[in-house]
Amino acid sequence: MSDVGAIVKPTFDAMKLKAEFPILARTVHGNVPLVYLDNAATSQKPRAVIDAITKYYECSNANVHRGGHALGAEATALYEDARSIVASFIGAQPNEIIFTRGTTESINLVAASWSSMMGETLKGCTIVVTEMEHHANIVPWQMACEKTGAVLKVIRVHDDGTLDMEHARELINDTTAFVSVVHVSNTLGVENDVRTICALARSVGALSLVDGAQSIVHHAINVTSLGCDFFVFSGHKLYAPTGIGVLFGRANVLESLPPYQGGGSMILDVTFERTTYNDVPVRFEAGTPNMEGAVGLAAAIRWFTALDLEALRVHEAELSERLLRDLNTIDGMRVFGPQTLHAGIASFVIDGMHAHDLGTLLDEQGVAIRTGHHCTMPLMKRFGVTSTARASIAAYTTHDDLDVLSAALLRSVRLLR
Amino acid sequence: MSDVGAIVKPTFDAMKLKAEFPILARTVHGNVPLVYLDNAATSQKPRAVIDAITKYYECSNANVHRGGHALGAEATALYEDARSIVASFIGAQPNEIIFTRGTTESINLVAASWSSMMGETLKGCTIVVTEMEHHANIVPWQMACEKTGAVLKVIRVHDDGTLDMEHARELINDTTAFVSVVHVSNTLGVENDVRTICALARSVGALSLVDGAQSIVHHAINVTSLGCDFFVFSGHKLYAPTGIGVLFGRANVLESLPPYQGGGSMILDVTFERTTYNDVPVRFEAGTPNMEGAVGLAAAIRWFTALDLEALRVHEAELSERLLRDLNTIDGMRVFGPQTLHAGIASFVIDGMHAHDLGTLLDEQGVAIRTGHHCTMPLMKRFGVTSTARASIAAYTTHDDLDVLSAALLRSVRLLR
Amino acid sequence: MTIDQNINVVRQEFESFPDWEDRYMHIIALGKGLAPYNEVHLTDEFKVKGCQSQVWLHAAIVGGRVRFEAESDALIVKGLITILLRLFNDRTPKEILEAPSDLVARLGFEQHLSQSRANGVASVLKQVKLYALAYSMVRA
Amino acid sequence: MTIDQNINVVRQEFESFPDWEDRYMHIIALGKGLAPYNEVHLTDEFKVKGCQSQVWLHAAIVGGRVRFEAESDALIVKGLITILLRLFNDRTPKEILEAPSDLVARLGFEQHLSQSRANGVASVLKQVKLYALAYSMVRA
Ligand SMILES: Cc1ncc(COP(=O)(O)O)c(C=O)c1O
Ligand SMILES: Cc1ncc(COP(=O)(O)O)c(C=O)c1O
């Protein structure tokens, strides 16, 4: 930027960004500096989000949608602004955004409401998911199948961790009523071609849901160009507070669905004889919502979109590549998923070592990674393991963090061999 | 306390307490000081709770129950400590406490899980509620009835706003499968004899749920002495953050219930052929929970129970009495509910004036009350009104606040006459 | 006067009451003076959605112009409706449809009224425009 | 030595490694030395619930004393189990049942191990006591 005429690659100052996250300055086990590489599980929160929560409670907290006083109007405006901010973040309309607790609740809402509407007509129909789904995108559909007699079909995963698109084309057919797929696998980091899958679903008259729990942080999302009927994600993985999530549903699809939970706000009129329900989206938001969560999510999106996102993508791609490279230098290393870009997630095992042993020794050195099945037991089975170690990055991850990880891994391996 | 030997009535310094709530120092409509009397809708948060949230994100945030690293262990310990704190607050065991979004979700969880377990066996059975229920304790049961063929029965409310216990005795009979009643009415402030009602339910082999959304703030709760199978409340009415609530269920009853939402944590083993579920309480907590909310709720309970609760009860009773007295001096005033203690809630209308007009004019004077149906439409119908004005107090309400309310009410009435 | 000119008049009238009390006294007085509503039209069909209090709005076309009739159980709402009808009564559907979309803000309502009141007015305005739209299509 | 005395020995051994690396080197060495487990018992029936890694625990009663046999797929866990079995192997059911309930803390595990490891040990300990309970009832 200083040399006029030089080709400038966008640079991203992750060090500076890191300073906005108070927790990243802490130590563990006495005085070992924390290196947080468990971002696919949950992200840390920047000062801007923490401050927005404080400000909400210090200035504007009141119950929403029940009108009457100035404070209530202010809280309602903040809550509805949050809805608009979420909507424009993913290319949707505000009335297509429903606030939930998280990805899990969003999927449960869709599976329960849609299957109760369809009822017995689903008998013999298929619901299609993939072998790499998070349990949150398996169990609700198993419950729906049990209720309705629909059958769950599973798109296979290739040895390299990519989806078998041939198999997808085969399974998504005239019997298919719903297709629910993960956008970016939380275990493999692999990005699925959900655009094609949603188009396949639409071509056979099936509805589609994209689990964006991981993709929302690493990819620009536009629900219209994805062509999905539903898109879901959690705030807590996007630098936002816990307890808030999003369900996007196409307006006319949402309008066709019966309510999920019953209570205040979601009704128009209640008598013991007959209750009529309110319009979308409040029809799906029974009771007092997590106002603070919505306000915090809006703050997180504002903070996130104010970053130089182009530079951030470059930075994340660089780190992802480096992470894979570093891992692959280790003897007996097996990294799951394709060897190309991993959306900042790398799952691995090392010959003769249990992932938990690695995790324990890394933890002693301040490095927080995840070990286990990552809520993807069927995928573990597919690859013949019971658990893997998973390192995952965020916007605040630095090359220094990866240096520490590399050194700590080597030390751990040495101890375990 | 200074005069040795004098009879000392516990005194409660609400003025001092108020200083712990940043929002109560603010003004509305330019520079009119806020007098917040909409506490039955939601409470404001003390510094201690706001600080606990900040501290959680600055120091300990991580995903819970997925083990592995120090931060995760810390977050899990905080989350499980919160469960224990809630449990001992209401005289329960930790494994009987399920974290939800709030009262509404707690009731929906019970109604959905229990009715799906009972299924067709409920045909012709009755579910008993009262005429003064909040919509959150009506609509989920209507949904359950629709699914199963059970019939909703409604205990009548006397003209003075108390429950018709004779009618309760009549309705709770051999056909009854579930009894779900509000402990303290959010519209009338009246306290129901839920102990007797739960005993009636138990005597006919029916399960019972107590909606403690309002009682949790104003009464000491012990679920064992209440004799209920379920007790539910929201954090946000108890000085805690939004988006967190509690479902207490007796251990052996909870254990008999099928899961509600499916996803991470609530499973033991997932295969596409067969999924087995985890033990109570995590079986009912699918996905990443609202960790911050649980930590905030624990902070709120710690803060609350550190108050001189005896003195607080006296203070609240005094204010309640005074509130009723003040209201009754106004010409054409009609206060709903019994003329005795109102648990800090007073609902009223004034002859020839619309509650919303009163609310608007009070709001201009900085006084935040609620106007509307308070999510109790059937009760409104019972009393032949479409809306009432409702003033409700909290621990931080002062006599000065009620002075302002009185003056503002008189001024509003003068304008509207 | 065009609707636009009328808006300015209303706004100025509003702003001539710097005190909330005088402002509401004025609105309440207007409310008390709202023309009587035909009881036959006190039905759900004519009820306006999205208001906290009950509001009914009925419209008829008379000589190419829309004649409104309204009722509410709340006095302040009646006053605000009186102002709205002053702007829109006996206008052509076209004039009504062309009224600025940020009208509630331009009237100063957002600034000088509580939010829920402003929202209620916006709901009534929406209904006013729906009637105008309907009549414009009937005539087209 | 009583179990109580043994606890102190283990604790002191643990505390003789102020460095995490030495401590884990010791645990890992112990793990590598864990007596072989009878493959016949590698079934779900003997799997310990509540551990992050897989743990199997089998027990038999030999001359009034409980003889444990354990296996895990994780080396550190095997090391910790070795320590536990050192405490409990060849004890009478009564002795085992009387072992202090805050044993994991008293061993210094809570302080010196990561939380999830300490939890895993607690789960194994629970299973050890369940076996002892079962055998104490069989004999009663
Ligand atoms: C791909 C994927 N789907 C679903 C979930 C569930 O999200 P949550 O636990 O926030 O509901 C997660 C995260 O754990 C995930 O990574
Ligand atoms: C008696 C009662 N029940 C249920 C509710 C619903 O609580 P929430 O909106 O927090 O779910 C409330 C509060 O609005 C209430 O007062």
Image (cartoon, coloured by chain):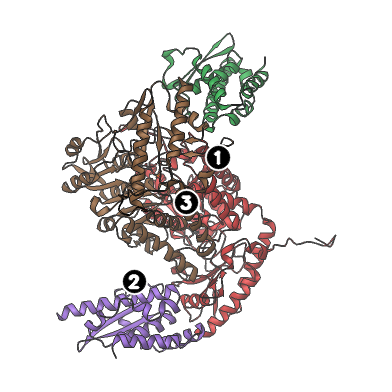
Chain colours: A brown, B red, C purple, D green
Confirm or deny contact between disc 3 and disc 2 (CB under 8 A).
no
Q: Position of residue B181 (x, y in %)?
A: 50, 55
| Mark 1 residue type | Thr
Residue A213 appears anywhere in the view: no
Q: Decide: few, some or many residues near mark 3? Use Cα within 10 Å; few <14, some 14-19, many ≥20.
A: many
Return the residue found at the far right: B4
Local SS, label 1: strand
Subunit that carries the residue with mark 3 = A
Q: Quadrant of ligand 1?
A: top left
What residue did someone put label 3 on?
Answer: A46
In front of the other: label 3 or label 2? Answer: 3
Front one among C68 and B75: B75
Residue B216, picture quadrant: bottom right
State the separation of the CA atoms marked 1 and 2: 56 Å
Local SS, label 3: loop
Residue B263, picture quadrant: top left
Q: Specify whether A142 is left or right of A238.
A: left
What residue did someone put label 2 on?
Answer: C49
| Mark 3 residue type | Pro
What residue did someone put label 1 on?
Answer: A27
